[in-house]
Amino acid sequence: MLDLSKKQKKFFVVKLTNGTTLNIPSPKKRIFEKMTAMNEISIDNLSAESINSVYELIAEILSSNTQKKKYTADEVGEMLDFEDINMLLDGYMAFAGYIVDDPN
């Protein structure tokens, strides 16, 4: 019997600029689809709407934390600059890729 409730989960640990540490699980389908869609955004087609989509995605990722702290895109925009956003998104995408590639 495969018992998924006993599987040891891996978390993406993030320490925010305000000192808060969050444990973020691997992405669920909806977040993974949004992350994949972000790959289509480039400097050439950057718009206010696509920038808002990035901040909404980051808010959703951060809000999936095990501490149950919720974030809005506006809060993320006040807390993190674009360099922070880029680092966080790159790190989380690498984490998600590691989870997909890891057989255990």
Image (cartoon, rainbow, N blue to C red):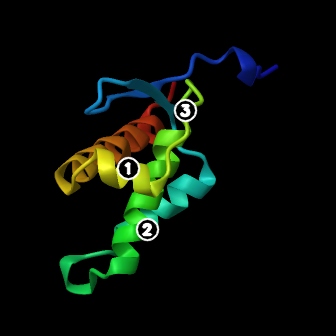
Gap in angstroms between the C-alphas marked 3 and 2: 20 Å
Indicate left or right for 14 with 65 as reference: left
Secondary structure under the numbered disc 3 in the rendered image: loop
Residue type of the residue flagged with mark 2: Ser
Who's the residue at 31% across and 82% down the image? 47
Q: Which residue is mark 2?
A: 53
Who's the residue at 32% across and 43% down the image? 94
* Circle 2 crowding by C-alpha within 10 Å: few under 14, some 14–19, many from 20: some
Residue type of the residue flagged with mark 3: Lys
* Circle 3 crowding by C-alpha within 10 Å: few under 14, some 14–19, many from 20: few
In the image, residue 36 sits, relative to residue 9, either above or below, namely: below
Numbered disc total = 3
Q: Which residue is mark 1?
A: 76
Q: Residue 6: horizontal and vertical position, in percent? A: 70, 14
Who's the residue at 64% across and 18% down the image? 7
Q: Earlier in the sequence, mark 3 or mark 1?
A: 3
Q: Earlier in the sequence, mark 1 or mark 2?
A: 2
Secondary structure under the numbered disc 1 in the rendered image: helix
Q: Quick check: marks 1 and 2 in contact, CB under 8 Å?
A: no
Indicate left or right for 46 with 96 as reference: left
From the viewer's perspective, is the residue at label 1 or at label 2 nearer? 1
Q: Which residue is mark 3?
A: 69
Residue type of the residue flagged with mark 1: Val
Q: Residue 104: horizontal and vertical position, in percent? A: 51, 24
**Residue at the far bottom in the pictured view:** 45
Corner quadrant of residue 67: top right
